[in-house]
Image (cartoon, rainbow, N blue to C red):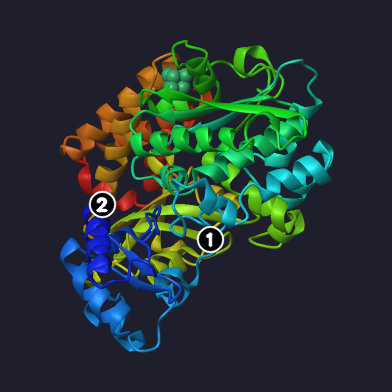
Amino acid sequence: NSLPIIDSLKKEIKNAGLEDFVSVSLTGCFGFCAQGPIIRVCPDDIFYIKVSADDAKEIVQEHLVNGNLVDRLLFLEASERKKVSKLEDMSFYKQQMRIALHKCGYMNPEKVEDYIANNGYANLSKCLTELSPEEVIKEVKLSGLRGRGGAGFPTGIKWEATRNSKSNQKYVVCNADEGDPGAFMDRSILEGCPHKVLEAMAICGYAVGADIGYIYIRAEYPLAIERLNLAISQAEKLGLLGENILGTGFNFKIELKYGAGAFVCGEGTALMRSIEGNRGEPRMKTYSSTKKGLWDVPTCSNNVETFANIPPIIENGGQWYRNIGTENSSGTKVFALGGKINNVGLVEIPMGTTLKDIVYNIGGGIPDNKKFKAVLTGGPSGGCIPVDHLDTPIDFDNLSHLGSMMGSGGMLVLDETDCMVDIAKFFLEFTVEESCGKCTPCRVGNKRLLEILTKITDGKGCEQDLLDLENLSKTIATTSLCGLGKSAPNPVLSTLNYFYDEYKAHVVDKK
Ligand code: SF4
């Protein structure tokens, strides 16, 4: 949608004779999907929403020539209409803190000069010239950063373990196989600021002693792939990647590997098998990948969002990051906010922000004044959290205590009209489809679960089916080989826990 708007703006700017003073720049995503396409006028920081190519003339004439805001296009709540002028003052952004998403929407992702002008690659330079690999790892450990791909493993400890593994060859892997339906934070970071991820991977390579990095990215992300390839070639030309980076003697090259869209390939061991050219199937974790990963050599694997936090941590120090968030979950988390919510989009909040703040202050509440019923966090393997827990501060531990999980950051809001049994069935259908079939509990168990759920939603279930659902879910969760199977019953278990009455209302009393 945006390309015709760019053309139209350029044409109108030329017609107004302003082409020597005003430039039009492509950017990545601002996160406010519900209001796109968006134009941001700098340095005024005025934000026009739902723009079409036809609006270009009015914006150029009124705003740029006459100095008036084009009021009908501004997204301002009535009470704020006069006083809000900055993006940060808008309710959608007020409680956000953009660290991983920082620079997305603020620069042209296709120009390395824009990234460099925004302190890009300065942190890689700082690491290579001022810090030893051990000092880099110390900062990452101090930050308390935990993996944003789902498991929440401490990133610094993973880097240290890879560094301590003795081997002539080591690898860095960036997991960009974002498979949760509705999650698009990694895509947005790669499309909006690809150099940030490349810089972070090179910092990681320096810290752990690796000279090759792979980005495993799903082939369904063509724009992210295009921008990554462009960014790699730009960085190589400037000596920021490849041989003898910045003249320091450090070598690090990055290659893309394409995934074919299998959800299970987001699992670490399956992803590595797929990069090796094998069938993307999980394997027993006899060894940590920091000892035996890709081609059985030490491999440090993090996802896109985790890497996106690294340059700011190096820039500001680990303690700065540690001071944001909660005791055991420092920093911020990006969520893809969707479902029955007014402000659909990408939001990045400090850990510890409550669900209520996300749904009502940032998300703008439920459309048509309907009642909030639950929020599903963690994607198809997550759990549903009901209204009683809306005041819960979000972090890894609290979500897990509520029977859900952080996952990669999908957040689906449900309202009073949603049937929770249907929701559990919907997500189980997805995981059954995506099971690789290697182990019996997941391959067979989840199919049986789905059969029982279908029977219940068809009005043919009985009370015994509810007991079977719970017992079978617990068995699958404890006996499946990989995270996909282990977490697949989460939507069933959490809805049984919090919405048992809805299940009861579906079943036939056979007494
Ligand atoms: Fe495959 Fe499921 Fe077993 Fe994982 S749990 S190995 S996805 S069958």
Residue 98: assigned label: 1
- In the image, is 481 to the left or to the right of 62? right
Residue 467 horizontal/vertical position (percent): 37, 35
- In the image, is 456 to the left or to the right of 237? left
Q: Residues within 10 Å of mark 1 (few under 14, many from 20)?
A: some
Determine whether the residue tagged by mark 2 lies in a helix, strand or loop. helix
Residue 262 higher or lower than 335, as above or below = above
Residue 73 higher or lower than 161, as above or below = below
Whether residue 395 is visible to the viewer of this picture, yes or no, is no
Mark 1 C-beta to ligand 1 under 8 Å: no
Residue 258 horizontal/vertical position (percent): 42, 24
Residue 28 horizontal/vertical position (percent): 40, 52
| Residue lying at 25% horizontally and 82% vertically, measured from the top left | 71
Q: Which circle's residue, 1 or 2, is located before the other in the chain?
A: 2
Name the one closer to the observer, 15 or 354.
Answer: 15
Name the one closer to the observer, 90 or 268.
Answer: 90
Determine whether the residue tagged by mark 1 lies in a helix, strand or loop. loop
Mark 2, residue position: 3
Quadrant containing the C terminus in the rendered view: top left
Q: Amino acid at mark 1?
A: Arg
Where is residue 381, by image quadrant?
top left
Residue 500 horizontal/vertical position (percent): 34, 49
Name the one closer to the observer, 491 or 473.
Answer: 491
Asked if the residues shown at circle 1 and circle 2 are in contact, with their CB atoms under 8 angstroms apart, the answer is no
Q: Amino acid at mark 2?
A: Leu
Which of label 1 and label 2 is nearer to you? Answer: 2
